[in-house]
Image (cartoon, rainbow, N blue to C red):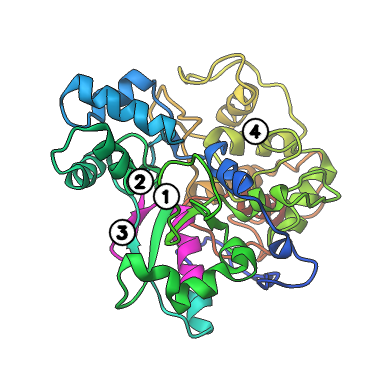
Amino acid sequence: MARIVRRALVAVVVAVLPVVPGEAGGVQDVPISAPAYLSMFDDAAFRGVRRPAAEVLDHFGEITGDAELDARIRRAAEQRGYRRQPVVTTELVWVDGRRLQAPVAEAWLELKAAARADGVALELRSAYRDLDGQQALFLRRLGGRTSDAAIDTTLRFAAPPGYSRHQTGFVLDVAQAGVEQGGFVNTAAYAWLSAADFAAPRAHGFVPSYPRDGERMGPDPEPWELAWVGAGRIACATGVTDPTGFCDAATSERADDISWLADLGVTVGCRPGRFCPDDPITRGEAASLLWRLHGAPAPAGGSPFVDVFADDVFASAVAWLWQLGVVHGTSPTTFSPDGLLSPDEAFALVVRLVTLDDRPAVVGIRGPVPAAGFEPGVVGALGVQVSRAEFASVLRAAVAV
């Protein structure tokens, strides 16, 4: 299985639970309605993007340069169901000559490999587009026309800048080699993707971005566009339950590690009923989990970081870990708690704490602590940005020495 990986600091043993599209009793079999598909993306609290104020987005995402005409286009777009989309705040990953959010790039390579194993050749036709690129695309389709009819026709096939899901880095257009986009619905590639209510894409965290029976969703249905939401969000939409209380934990290949954290009471998830296993973990979240694993001790004072406030849920965690020399800031006065954790940072956190001979109070480790690193564990290859589920594996391996 193709993966985008970084050098691991420990030996790895990967135990992957196979996910078979259409497997009886699996979440891939459960039909999902068009509104549910749409809300999975529209209502997701993705990492690596933010939602600027509408007036700010309009300023940087002008359409024609004519304020009155731009306002008409935006009103027409919103009447069709287009929504303003967030903008990228993290570094994107190059894959197949395009840029995507890191977890989406990994999932795309896995989906393409699964298709190839079934004799289907998928191509990446389009991925991330910035505001300027979306403006150019929209203006080409508008062709200088300004009538309401022309605007409506253009909106059937293209979003104005600021309204395209492509600007998030979580959406891609797929194709079959040698086939124009308009004919994609009649290809073997589309037949494979759409079989059993998109079972294959869903197994890798993708859903149809604009399902065929969707209403007021912006453009006309686009069978070639897939949106990545993560397998966890898909599982929650199907009503799956899990003993951990997290509806999105059961489908993760690291479900045992998530369950381990939950059983210890170390995690309450990203929000009620959800662990968000597919989402990259932030520096603040990682510090909080590591601190709670060690019994949530009270720090002897604060930290020097001006971007960690006293009422932040991770404030005590950051202060305690900083006082031990376990966490370092991104500068002498900033911690960047919303920044996403890299594999090197994830392993460095646990290695520094383990080498202090500080046994986690929660699990009561006994025995010698290695001078550096920790013994081989079920960690596996990590993505460019460590997910919440992956960090659970790192923590579990750290205490399993």
Q: Residues within 10 Å of mark 1 (few under 14, many from 20)?
A: some
- Report which residue position mark 1 lands on: 220
- Mark 2 → mark 3, Cα distance in angstroms: 24 Å
- Report which residue position mark 4 lands on: 288
Q: Nearer the viewer, residue 26 or 260?
A: 26
- Between label 2 and label 3, give the one nearer the viewer: 2
Q: Is residue 117 left or right of residue 151?
A: right
Q: Residues within 10 Å of mark 4 (few under 14, many from 20)?
A: many
**Observer able to see residue 220:** yes
Tell me the magenta residue range: 91-112
- Mark 4 → mark 2, Cα distance in angstroms: 46 Å
- Report which residue position mark 2 lands on: 156
Q: Residues within 10 Å of mark 3 (few under 14, many from 20)?
A: some
Q: Is residue 209 inside the magenta stretch?
A: no
Residue type pointed to by label 3: Arg
Residue type pointed to by label 4: Ser
